[in-house]
Image (cartoon, helix red, strand yellow):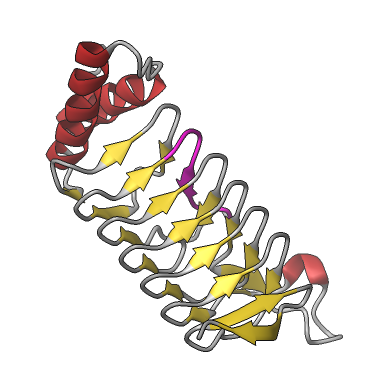
Amino acid sequence: MKTVAQPDTWRLAFVRVLLALPDLHRLRPYWRWLRRARIAALAARGAAVTPDATVHERVHIHRGVAVELQSRAELRDRVRLGIDEPGLRASSFSLGAGSVVLSDTHIDCSAPVRIGRGSHVGRRNQLFTHTHDVSRRDVRVMDAPVVSRGITIGDDVMLFNDVVVLPGVTIGDGAVVAIRSLVTRDVPPYAIVAGAPARVIGERR
């Protein structure tokens, strides 16, 4: 018996095709059309996106993630908004006005991820919203329960390249996270942190 694909399946396939097309920025009419088509296709699938947001090529968005892209928000090449652990429910991702997530960044959306206005998430960053609770000896690590907690990044925040942020972390407004830092705890507003684990080394004055 022949099955008929559901409309949402066709819309998802269309979005995937648009995201796979090369950007070709120098071909201005093509690039303008592609930007608009991607945003329109995401909006048709229920994403809260503004017309002046930008999604570049080969961005992967898990079908269950509720996406919000505010004015002039930008997802660069090969950004992944996904679910890392089978069986977890997809949550939400919000990118504030004028914020950008650079290429090859991986964001686990098994709990809410919110990035504020005018913030910069560098290349190859990894944001994890779930972990395995391996604290008990009587539970095998392979059977350790999964715990999910959201991540909040404030306004005017700079995350340099190769930063890792762990579940439950809040990075305050105006904070700066140095290259290749591992953020395991909350970062105060306007603090400058570095290292693994990241520690406060200065302050924006």
Of residues 78 and 87, the one drawn nearer to the viewer in this rendering:
78
Quadrant of the rendered image containing residue 30: top left
Say which residue appears at 30% left-offset and 10% top-offset: 27
Judge from the rendering whether residue 198 lies leftward or rightward of residue 63; answer left or right: right
Name the quadrant of the N terminus.
top left
**Does 179 sit above or below residue 135?**
above
Q: In the image, residue 112 lies at what x, y percent? A: 39, 68
**Does 83 sit above or below residue 59?**
below
Say which residue appears at 29% left-offset and 55% top-offset: 98
Q: In the image, residue 196 lies at what x, y percent? A: 79, 73
Span colored in magenta: 76-84
**Does 134 sit above or below residue 23?**
below
Say which residue appears at 47% left-offset and 33% top-offset: 77
Judge from the rendering whether residue 52 lies leftward or rightward of residue 192; answer left or right: left
Q: In the image, residue 17 lies at what x, y percent? A: 33, 19
Q: In the image, residue 160 lies at what x, y percent? A: 60, 58
Of residues 6 and 161, the one drawn nearer to the viewer in this rendering:
161
Confirm whether the magenta stretch covers residue 78: yes
Judge from the rendering whether residue 172 lies leftward or rightward of residue 9; answer left or right: right
Confirm whether the magenta stretch covers residue 140: no
